[in-house]
Amino acid sequence: MRRLSGSKFWTLFIAAVVIMVSLSVVGCQPPEEEVEPPEEDPDEEVGPTEGGTVRIAISSDPENLNPLILPTGVVAPVFECLFNGLVRDNPDWEWVPDAAEDWEVSDDGRTVTFFLHDDITFHDGEPMTAHDVKFTLQSMAHPDYIGGQFGYVSTILGAEEYREGEADDVEGLEVIDDHTIAITTVEPDASIFNTVSRGIAAILPEHILGDVPHEEWQRHEFNQKPIGTGPFKIVEREADSHLTLEAHDDYFKGRPYIDRLIFRIGDDQAMLGAFMNEEVDIIEAPAEEVETVEDLPFANVHVHEGGSFNYLGLNNLHPCLGQPEVRQAIATALNIKEITATATQGYGEPIIAPHTPSSWAYPADCEGWPYDPDKAAEMLDDLGWEVNPDTGIREKDGVKMSYDWYNVDRDEHRRIASLVQQNLEDVNIELDIQVIDFATMTHVLLPRDADGAGVERSKDDFGIYTLGLTVGPDPQGMERQFHSRHSEPGGHNYVSYSNERVDELWGEVRTALDLDQRRELAQELYSILCREVPWIPLYATTDISVAHDRVQGFEPNVLGQVWNVTEWWVDDGS
């Protein structure tokens, strides 16, 4: 027999007494006419119901849906619905269970043993086991892997040897049984939970990809309709139009309430129009349209921290951008405050380093490069970049200070481009703005040959580009953007930045287990990046997520829009 708590016992006891007294009183009264039951309150809150479709707008077509090939912010919400990691983060930036229900850390801090849920299945019905986890992490270290994620697993014991072809296996990945895996690192690694998280190492099916050579992953059909373990599975894909996902009935955390998610693809204005016509349920609203959507009777507007930032990436191989002093001058020529205010309509925050200000890693001792066009012009003069009186463009040794500048076709980026172009023209720098879609941008930043393999980067790939990046509070996620080894073909150090001390600091930050020590090292690292300006950080974002009121349970935050998608349900007023 189940035992009642004291409070529950007394609640039931008092209720029984009240009922008995009521019955005795009723028994002493003359019979009364039957009373009609009260009508239901139409405003009474209804609980979650199953069924329905929710339509979400995304800005561009995700060319690839293998999370180990090209993980980006554009497809992050899709990945969130399709895959699991061993852990994930919650809105307080704490690591919480995902595919792993628990874990143990060894006394020396080098081994973490993860215990998996024993009822996880892939979308095709095959069970997910610790072997799939090992396959995923070991693939990131494979010599032929082209996804640029090796840095995350490089500290696992034996990963370097495996990547160099000196071992047939990664020693530090030990499958103990189908639902237990131990991960051992060369040294204590404070970022190992980030490595095995849903956002980095989404678990892939060995039974599908195990026999596919890693160099062929880029072209494999899995990229179009991947099989994961997440709460939804992909059932339809139409290029540049939509992705349709259906609920995974056997999802180990419980089937989602809604039956179907449709990711509609279109630019900001097209999706805004679709939302206003009630053809789309969830959008990220352009800042200048907040008042418009607030006036819609069915719109719920959520203004929240975005967890991302926008920046200008500067090709360090370019003859006009190789010197830190030149990059400093360019940063000094930019009115970041005005760019932020205009691009975000007042919803952004100017930044001086490539991270969000809410992170403990954000540097406190760097001023950035305050806007001063006269000083910027003087800095360029001192560096020998003189203005050609005939063209009005700066030159040095016969080389013009002129850049190809690539922007994704978004309203916000167009506003950035207009102001940056004017700022740089004021100091006699020429920009040739190239507006492209996101898929083309990936080919610019990750040049590949006809077989999909990465090729050597060059000074001619681009001059400047504009992108946004989503980050958590831990700086380790930025290692692949700035460590010199990630300048190799296929790596994500798009700007080919190299600094020996920065390389050392990535390792020191990773192995420091004390948070205060990590903070000190990370701030030194970011202070160097602030001074050397491989990127020009612009602003941290504030997101404006808007949902139709038929979508219940929608609570966007720093983790994005779909972090709690399994809790959504549809209320169509029926």
Image (cartoon, rainbow, N blue to C red):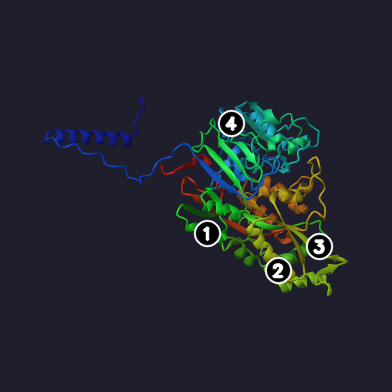
Lower sequence index among marks 4 and 2 = 4
Label 3: which residue? Answer: 320
Which is in the foreground here, disc 1 or disc 4?
A: 1
- The picture places residue 362, in percent across and down from the top left corner, at 63, 56
Which corner quadrant holds the N terminus?
top left
Mark 4–mark 2 distance (CA, rounded to whole Å): 56 Å
- Relative to residue 285, is residue 169 depicted above or below? above
Using the image as rendered, state which of residue 264 and residue 102 is in the foreground. Answer: 264
Lower sequence index among marks 2 and 3 = 3
Mark 1–mark 4 distance (CA, rounded to whole Å): 45 Å
Disc sitting over residue 115 in the figure: 4
Using the image as rendered, state which of residue 168 and residue 559 is in the foreground. Answer: 559
Which is in the foreground here, disc 4 or disc 2?
A: 2
Disc sitting over residue 290 in the figure: 1
Check disc 1: other Cα within 10 Å, few if <14, some if 14-19, many if 20+: some
Mark 2–mark 1 distance (CA, rounded to whole Å): 27 Å
Check disc 3: other Cα within 10 Å, few if <14, some if 14-19, many if 20+: many
Which is in the foreground here, disc 2 or disc 3?
A: 2
Mark 2–mark 3 distance (CA, rounded to whole Å): 18 Å
Check disc 4: other Cα within 10 Å, few if <14, some if 14-19, many if 20+: many
- Residue type at mark 3? Cys
- Relative to residue 297, is residue 30 depicted above or below? above
Lower sequence index among marks 1 and 3 = 1
- Residue type at mark 1? Val
- In percent of the image, x 71 and y 42: which residue is there? 149
- The picture places residue 120, in percent across and down from the top left corner, at 57, 30
Label 2: which residue? Answer: 422
Which corner quadrant holds the C terminus?
top left
- The picture places residue 60, in percent across and down from the top left corner, at 65, 49
Q: Secondary structure at mark 3?
A: loop
